[in-house]
């Protein structure tokens, strides 16, 4: 209560802005994920690792555009390339262009993809990946992870972070199928439960075009795969003749130089990418093996889009690719790991019922003592403590993502001092909780 009072006292301009914006934009925001009660803070501008809000506060950005701003806000290299495109190249040709080909060649190598296509958003990429899998297998059904989010595409808006009351007994995940998704085309399985998936594939395998999952679930804070789980999923898909799609919209470059698939050593048939590859411009991609992507070559699956691979976005993508070297990402990851260790030390010292989870340059504090392996474990974590921890930061000028399902990101613009301030606020919170 006190922290909410402080929030509204410190952010009156954001409150007013939200009231005005709500008259034209539902909830006053441009994506429902941007909203929180009573209102979100409104940001005027950003640079490096910092946001500047309409109340004149400087805020350390640990959300970094849900992970899209991996190279930092207004990264000089990105700015320079985009400016060059704006002044000397052009913004849209709807023809092939050398920059798009260069970026595609880089992604072939980096992400181990034989072929790929560019899109604008993660939603589009997952939609096209599913469509490709259906064209390739000539099967209709898909299997997704309970609680998992893959964007706004109807076919995947099933069992997206549902209330526990809606999903039935623990042993029987039930999809809530939207009205325009045919019943029986989407099956839901718990993450980290290989026997369940194998059983599902044994029952429905010959109808299942693809199993789609985030290799590391980063829409439920961070949920790591059990040892051997992803390799088991790969083998189960092969046995059933179903494709494996890794949704790397959130992992991607934030999980390492070649994404989570390379890091985990499991090769899916298709990968979707977005967020971190675009440097804050709307870039996404889907791609995979030559055999599967042949569907796009021979027209079994046509892929369209006016803005795909436009030279403006490609200029940013090329800059991001150059900036995200192994060394640069390893440097940010080292800062992240050191910070996770410090937070774990505080958790131990104050005996808090929490632990940290990290993946690449991302991290989170999970308010549970046991590891979270599934959506149901995640729902059993202490949401009130997580909200307090988030709000405590917001009130002290540190913005972790608005939503307790997210994680922080150490971008190439964050310094150890920036992370020490996150850690320092966490320590103060721990003290307050224990006093
Ligand atoms: N897939 C995953 C795993 C995501 O987290 C998101 C967005 O957060 C999407 C897909 C959708 O991406 P976009 O918001 O670019 O449409």
Image (tube, rainbow, N blue to C red):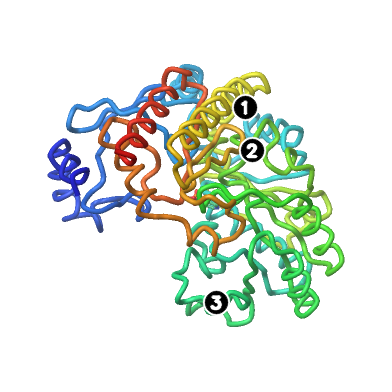
Residue at image position (38%, 31%) is: 427
Mark closer to the chain start, 2 or 3: 2
**Within 8 Å: ligand 1 and the Cβ of disc 3?**
no
Residue at image position (34%, 40%) is: 434
Crowd class of label 1 (few under 14; some 14 to 19; many from 20; radius 10 Å): many
| x then y, percent, for residue 364 | 50, 41
| x then y, percent, for residue 241 | 84, 67
Relative depth, front residue between 325 and 133: 325
Asked if marks 1 and 2 touch (Cβ < 8 Å), the reply is no
Q: Is residue 174 left or right of residue 47?
A: right
**Within 8 Å: ligand 1 and the Cβ of disc 1?**
no
Mark closer to the chain start, 1 or 2: 2
Asked if marks 2 and 3 touch (Cβ < 8 Å), the reply is no
Which type of secondary structure does the marked residue at label 3 adopt? loop
Relative depth, front residue between 9 and 258: 9
Give the alpha-carbon distance from disc 3 to disc 1, as whole Å. 37 Å
Location of the C terminus (image quadrant):
top left
* Residue 91 is at least partly visible in this image: no
Which type of secondary structure does the marked residue at label 2 adopt? loop
The numbered dot on residue 291 is none
Which type of secondary structure does the marked residue at label 1 adopt? helix
Q: To which residue does mark 1 refer?
A: 321
Crowd class of label 3 (few under 14; some 14 to 19; many from 20; radius 10 Å): some
Residue located farthest toward the bottom when viewing the structure as drawn: 183
Q: To which residue does mark 3 refer?
A: 181
* Residue 34 is at least partly visible in this image: yes
Crowd class of label 2 (few under 14; some 14 to 19; many from 20; radius 10 Å): few
In this figure, what is the number of numbered marks? 3
Residue located farthest toward the right when viewing the structure as drawn: 239
Residue at image position (63%, 34%) is: 100
Q: To which residue does mark 2 refer?
A: 96
């Amino acid at each position: 209560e006190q922290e909410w009072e402080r929030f509204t006292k410190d952010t009156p301009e954001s409150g007013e802005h939200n009231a005005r914006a709500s008259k034209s934009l539902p909830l006053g925001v441009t994506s429902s994920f941007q909203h929180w009660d009573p209102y979100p803070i409104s940001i005027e501008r950003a640079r490096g690792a910092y946001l500047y809000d309409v109340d004149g506060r400087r805020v350390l950005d640990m959300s970094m555009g849900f992970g899209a701003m991996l190279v930092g806000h207004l990264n000089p290299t990105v700015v320079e390339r985009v400016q060059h495109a704006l002044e000397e190249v052009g913004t849209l040709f709807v023809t092939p262009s050398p920059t798009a080909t260069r970026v595609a060649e880089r992604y072939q190598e980096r992400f181990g993809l034989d072929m790929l296509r560019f899109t604008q958003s993660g939603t589009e990429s997952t939609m096209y990946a599913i469509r490709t899998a259906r064209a390739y297998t000539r099967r209709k059904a898909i299997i997704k992870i309970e609680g998992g989010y893959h964007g706004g595409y109807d076919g995947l808006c099933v069992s997206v972070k549902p209330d526990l009351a809606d999903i039935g007994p623990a042993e029987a995940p039930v999809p809530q199928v939207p009205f325009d998704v045919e019943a029986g085309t989407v099956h839901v399985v718990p993450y980290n439960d290989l026997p369940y998936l194998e059983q599902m594939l044994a029952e429905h395998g010959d109808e299942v075009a693809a199993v789609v999952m985030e290799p590391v679930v980063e829409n439920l804070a961070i949920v790591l795969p059990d040892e051997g789980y992803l390799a088991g999923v790969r083998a189960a898909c092969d046995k059933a003749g179903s494709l494996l799609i890794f949704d790397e919209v959130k992992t991607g470059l934030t999980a390492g130089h070649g994404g989570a698939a390379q890091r985990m050593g499991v090769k899916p048939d298709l990968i979707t990418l977005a967020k971190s590859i675009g440097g804050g411009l709307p870039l996404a991609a889907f791609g995979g093996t030559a055999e599967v992507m042949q569907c796009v070559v021979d027209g079994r699956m046509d892929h369209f889009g006016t803005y795909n691979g436009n030279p403006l976005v490609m200029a940013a993508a090329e800059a991001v690719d150059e900036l995200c070297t192994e060394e640069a990402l390893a440097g940010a990851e080292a800062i992240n790991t050191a910070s996770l260790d410090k937070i774990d030390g505080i958790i131990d010292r104050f005996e808090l019922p929490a632990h940290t989870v990290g993946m690449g340059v991302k991290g989170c504090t999970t308010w549970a003592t046991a590891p979270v392996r599934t959506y149901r474990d995640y729902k059993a974590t202490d949401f009130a403590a997580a909200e307090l921890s988030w709000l405590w930061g917001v009130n002290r000028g540190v913005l972790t993502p608005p939503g307790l399902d997210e994680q922080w990101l150490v971008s190439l613009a964050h310094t150890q001092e920036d992370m020490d301030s996150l850690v320092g606020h966490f320590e103060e919170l721990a003290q307050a909780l224990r006093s």
